[in-house]
Image (cartoon, rainbow, N blue to C red):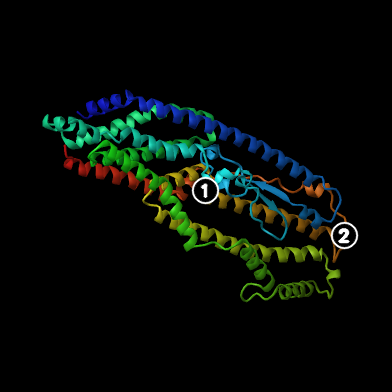
Amino acid sequence: MMGALVLKETRALLRDGRLWMLGGALFLLFVAMLATAQSGLRQAGQERREVEAASRSQWDHQGEKNPHRGAHFGLYAFKPASPLAGVEPGIDAQAGQALWLEPHRRNMAKFAPAADAPPSIGLGRLTPAFVLLTLVPLLIAVLGHGTVAQERESGTLRLLQACGARARPLVLGKWLGLCAGVGLVLMPALLIGAWLVVDRRGLPQALVLGAALIAYYAVWAALTVLVSMHSRSARAALLVLIAAWVTTIFVVPRLGAALVERSTPLPTGQAFWDAIARDIEQGLPGDGTASERLRAHEAALLAEHGVTRLEDLPFGANAKRRIFRDAYAARVHALHFSALWEAQLRQQVLLRGITWPSPMAPMRAIGSALAGTDLAHRRHFEDAAEQYRQRFTTLMDEWDLRATRGVTSFDSKYAGDAQWQAMPVWTYEPPGIGFALRSAWPDFAALALWLVAALTALALTARRVAP
């Protein structure tokens, strides 16, 4: 019986002209937006590689200069885009694409794509994820609002119950039929999207994303049938579903973001950098000021080597002092950046708690994690870039330490292209799918709970369907 019900509902849906008209429009919109996004992603990737090559070439051919002046020439570290970044740009659209790496200081990322976007972007970003997460649920609601209510209005529901049709198989059959009909229309778009986006490197993430989208659409289909089941008319069901769509898609996420920003604000950029400068200059508790720390370090060096002047040290005194100061500065930067990341993580946890009434919230978080555009992947990239920054500045100072004796003038030029080219090239390997699954497991759990709750409500209330 269940198979016959599903087949009947699927055929009825496929004969509905609205499915092909609205589904076709979404298909064209999704493919066009995805092709545009991928084209922009490829262009941005090409520009990134060109800038990286030019920056490295300039670094490698600085000519003769003081090694510390050469280190201040600096290098760029760019965050590579994953294959799915064009589908769900996540926070990468608002965060910077590149980190400027230089001695003494850890910088924030800059060159955010949103800074180059037109003013209308504030009305909402039109991305392939917008179609998948926002417009497809609306399509499900428009197509499925009359699954039960329309049969109640026409008297068919009463006739079915009089013929002995049980309510629960009837309702579940309508849910499965709605899922099957929408799936048949969406499948070509998803297959074309996979062909445009996915390569072997991103295939596992794409498969998991596809499974999550199926669960997400199943939730919306269950909610649609549930509302239709308890509405006296198809028009009333449609109004309730549109109100629910607006609330869960737009109101809840934006209200949650506003509440999080108000309740757990992040420090301003000025306050953040002032705190770092203060802790470096005045010292962390018990460490003394910068001048006190440096005097103690120099005294220990002189005592260790049995000399009374820095000029008599058997190695580069300036380089040794820089290594000491930079190690302390890196420690202070690590403390403050770690506190900033933890504050952002607390915001993320609070946002999950506030936006639980919206199934789109966990689905969007899952998409960002699988695309490598969430907070966890951003931190992984910036921490890797910071490790490289400390490595290349330390290597330069260690070479200076060995190449000189005593105190040398900052204007002395004794490093050349051989030293610049000896620095390792920046490379970054993004984490695999396991990292994404671990970072987004609360969102997977929330989506699974939504699906279980929707199907449970559908099954438990099916017995009370009034003809």
| Mark 1 crowd level (few <14, some 14–19, many ≥20, 10 Å Cα) | many
Instruction: Please state which amino acid type lies under the numbered disc 2.
Output: Asp
Tag shown at residue 326 = none
Tag shown at residue 374 = 1
Disc 1 to disc 2, how far (Cα)?
44 Å
Tag shown at residue 411 = 2
* Image spot of residue 150 (x, y percent): 24, 33
Residue occupying image coordinates x 80% and y 65%? 318
Q: How many marks?
A: 2
Question: Callout 2: helix, strand or loop?
Answer: loop
**Left or right, 54 with reference to 217:** right
* Image spot of residue 88 (x, y percent): 51, 41
Residue occupying image coordinates x 35% and y 24%? 17
Question: Depth check: 462 or 315 in front?
Answer: 462
**Left or right, 464 with reference to 314:** left
Question: Depth check: 387 or 229 in front?
Answer: 229
Residue occupying image coordinates x 42% and y 54%? 352
Question: Callout 1: helix, strand or loop?
Answer: loop
**Left or right, 448 with reference to 337:** left
Question: Depth check: 240 or 305 in front?
Answer: 240
Q: Earlier in the sequence, mark 1 or mark 2?
A: 1
State which quarter of the image contains the C terminus.
top left
Figure quadrant of residue 394: bottom right
Instruction: Please state which amino acid type lies under the numbered disc 1.
Output: Asp
